[in-house]
Image (cartoon, rainbow, N blue to C red):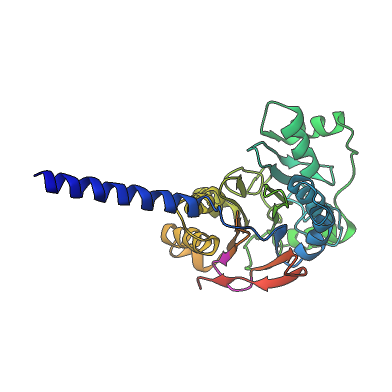
């Protein structure tokens, strides 16, 4: 009996030691290749370049992701983000964005009109209010009170496309056509702190007031400074159903590498929507505290940009389920 008890105690000690080692790996305590910034889609290259100006000088990841995503936000040629974004079915351009730092501070705006850089309004929400999310007219009033300029976001090109759409008034998402895509960006600074930003004009010709995953903390973006960060792109409704970015981070907490975590999250969507998942696109992008990257999508064609000391701002195509 004593021998069995001794073996039991020895086995318990070994298991406890193994658990400690697993926690070390799960918390990513290995040496880090930093800084690094990654972002969704081809327009991530220009965004990464701006973020890198800050990261490469030892700047804060939060400042880098804000500056980075401002690039497509301010580009009138980009029809899925910020200025130039395609409008809702009433012809009104509404923007969604969120931002999150290494301390779990976060801010967001949704259905915001007339402001070119919703990501910066989201940061003001985070830093100057007790709230996380402001929407609609309230978000606009807050932005104007904090010095943001009211502008017309509907460009001539986007207005032309909207009027053409009105002839049939049909909506059907088209895989990898950036009429419903987002820039999500996550960065790891030289101080080993993480931050993320996500911003979009949402679905083209959406119903008035529709909000997708992009401004929702835990859906479009999630940052856990002990583990890693994740962001998403594509059809936001399906990301919201599984709290996608939070799920990816929690899967990394369980010991999965970022690639494995992104794949498991996509497979969760397939399991929940086996028929619908063949017709839509959703992609996840993740980084852990080791600077290891993951990217995975439902369909082929999801691209992302990476910039680090080892990778000079290069575009990659993610693996996909289908």
Instruction: Point out residue 258 in the picture as x, y percentages from the top left corner.
Output: 55, 60
Name the side, left or right, on which 18 lies relative to 8.
right
Compared with residue 213, is residue 43 higher up or lower down, i.e. above or below? below
Q: Residue furthest left?
A: 1
**Residue 164 visible within the image:** yes
Residue placed most toward the observer, 176 or 58: 58
Magenta extent: 295-301
Residue 163 visible in this rendered orientation of the protein: no
- State the residue at coordinates (82%, 34%): 143
Q: Quadrant of residue 271?
A: bottom left
Q: Position of residue 294 (x, y in %)?
A: 58, 63
Residue drawn at x 64%, y 69% as measured from the top left:
302
Q: Nearer the viewer, residue 74 or 36?
A: 36
Nearer to the camera, 22 or 205: 22
For image coordinates 88% across by 37% down, the residue present is 148
Where is 188 relative to 292, above or below? above
Q: Tell whether position 31 is magenta.
A: no
Q: Is residue 233 left or right of residue 146?
A: left
């Amino acid at each position: 009996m004593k021998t069995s008890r001794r073996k039991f105690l020895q086995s318990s000690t070994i298991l406890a030691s193994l658990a400690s080692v697993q926690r070390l790996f799960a918390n990513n305590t290995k040496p880090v290749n930093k800084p690094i910034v990654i972002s969704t889609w081809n327009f991530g290259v220009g965004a990464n370049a701006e973020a890198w100006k800050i990261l490469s000088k030892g700047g804060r990841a939060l400042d880098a992701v804000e500056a980075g995503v401002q690039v497509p936000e301010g580009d009138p040629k980009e029809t899925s983000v910020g200025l130039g974004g395609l409008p809702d079915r009433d012809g009104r351009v509404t923007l969604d964005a969120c931002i999150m730092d290494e301390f779990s501070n976060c801010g967001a705006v949704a259905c915001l009109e007339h402001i070119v850089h919703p990501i910066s309004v989201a940061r003001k929400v985070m830093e100057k209010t007790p709230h996380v999310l402001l929407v609609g007219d309230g978000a606009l009033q807050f932005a104007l009170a904090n010095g943001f300029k009211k502008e017309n976001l509907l460009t001539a090109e986007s207005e032309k496309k909207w009027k053409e759409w009105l002839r049939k008034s049909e909506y059907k998402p088209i895989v990898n056509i950036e009429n419903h895509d987002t820039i999500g960006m996550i960065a790891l600074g030289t101080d080993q702190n993480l931050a993320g930003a996500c911003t979009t004009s949402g679905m083209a010709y959406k119903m008035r007031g529709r909000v997708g995953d992009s401004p929702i903390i835990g859906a479009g973006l999630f940052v856990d400074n002990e583990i890693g960060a994740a962001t998403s792109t594509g059809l936001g409704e399906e990301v919201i159903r599984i709290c996608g970015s939070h799920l990816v981070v929690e899967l990394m907490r369980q010991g999965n590498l970022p690639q494995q975590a992104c794949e498991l999250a996509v497979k969760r969507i397939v399991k929940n929507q086996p028929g619908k998942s063949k017709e839509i696109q959703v992609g996840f992008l993740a980084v852990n505290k080791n600077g290891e990257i993951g990217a995975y999508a439902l369909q082929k064609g999801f691209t992302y940009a990476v910039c680090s000391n080892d990778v000079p701002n290069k575009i990659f195509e993610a693996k996909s389920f289908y």
